[in-house]
Amino acid sequence: MGTGIGRSVKRGVACWLAAAGAAQALVAQAEPAKITTLSGVVTNPNGVAIPRAELLIVNSELKAMSNDSGVYEFFAVPVGRIRLIARRIGFEPEEARVTLNEGMHKQVDFELTGVPELLDSVMVREAGGNGRMADFWSRRMLGVGAFITRAEIERRRPQHPSDLLRTVVGVKVTMGDAGLDKPTISMGRNTPLSRSGRQTGTSLANDCKVSYYVDGSYVPPGTFHMDDMSALLLEAIEIYRGPAETPARLRQRDTACGVIVIWTREPPQKQPQRPPAFG
């Protein structure tokens, strides 16, 4: 009698355990899968977004492309230690090693450095976008040189165009005699000074004039100064402080002292006039 009761209890416990295990399995199946994600932003050293950069996870087929804001995203990334590479033509590739756990989100940002020698290749690929300012935006994205946009010009409201260069590292703006002459703009090489701060002699920088491009057209040195135009006419400015920064397509025989590329504003488009209505 006792033995029969004991067997019944054991069978009941076994059935209960089996039912509990099945229930746990069903609950586990009902729980949503934990997805591991990875995202970030790709920029140049100046913080300018780099669109269409390729992101790839080594030893996998997973790839992503940064959007116009430089943002990329991966979903359902393998867990564990991975190698993530960011690359784009015209830039040195960068690699990051990341450890990912199940269900976690990881942000990995990349800062790509432009390669001036590859700039022309970038320009060819980017041709046709952003209208006549396509060259400006492509070179700004590469990040080699200094760039001033219309937004900064409006924010600073300069009296003269050369005032915008006073905050550019590596550029010196020296006022003319009695403030009447146009200021001298020099890049990289300055007049030597003694310990007391007095000028000790002349240097090549005194006779080295920057070169200009205006709306894509080259202007020979000595024939133009950026202060010849009103600051109200400026749309954007590019500054290249020597041959190492100057793109190949902007180099001339006399551009060793620096290049300033000026883009002027386009006149507003006239709205078509409606014919008069007759009652």
Image (tube, rainbow, N blue to C red):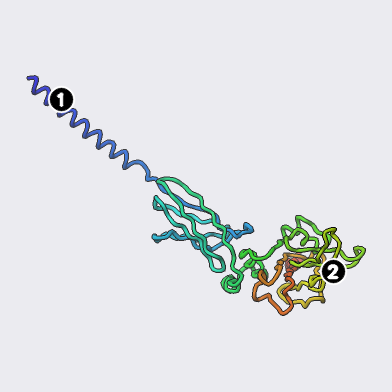
Front residue of 69 and 95: 95
Task: Identify which residue is drawn at 63% across, 63% down.
Answer: 143
Q: In this view, does 71 lie above or below 177?
A: above
Quadrant of res 46: bottom right
Position of residue 174 in the picture relative to residue 152 (left or right): right
**Where does the image place residue 121, in percent across and percent down from the top left?**
57, 73
User: How far apart in space, not on screen, are marks 1 and 2 (Cα)?
Assistant: 108 Å
Give the residue at x 73% y 58%. 152
> Count the marks: how many?
2
Examine the image and state in which quarter residue 224 appears.
bottom right
Q: Nearer the viewer, residue 120 or 92?
A: 92
Q: In which quarter of the image is the N terminus?
A: top left
Left or right of 84 on screen, residue 224:
right
Q: Which amino acid does label 2 sit on?
A: Gly
Q: Residue type at mark 1?
A: Val
Helix, strand, or loop for circle 1? helix
Number of other residues with Cα within 10 Å of mark 1, as a class: few under 14, some 14 to 19, many 20 or more: few
Residue 273 appears anywhere in the view: no
Q: Residue 100: x, y in percent?
A: 43, 49
Q: What residue did someone put label 2 on?
A: 201
Is there CB contact under 8 Å for labels 1 and 2?
A: no
Badge nearest the viewer, 1 or 2: 2
Residue at far front of view: 195
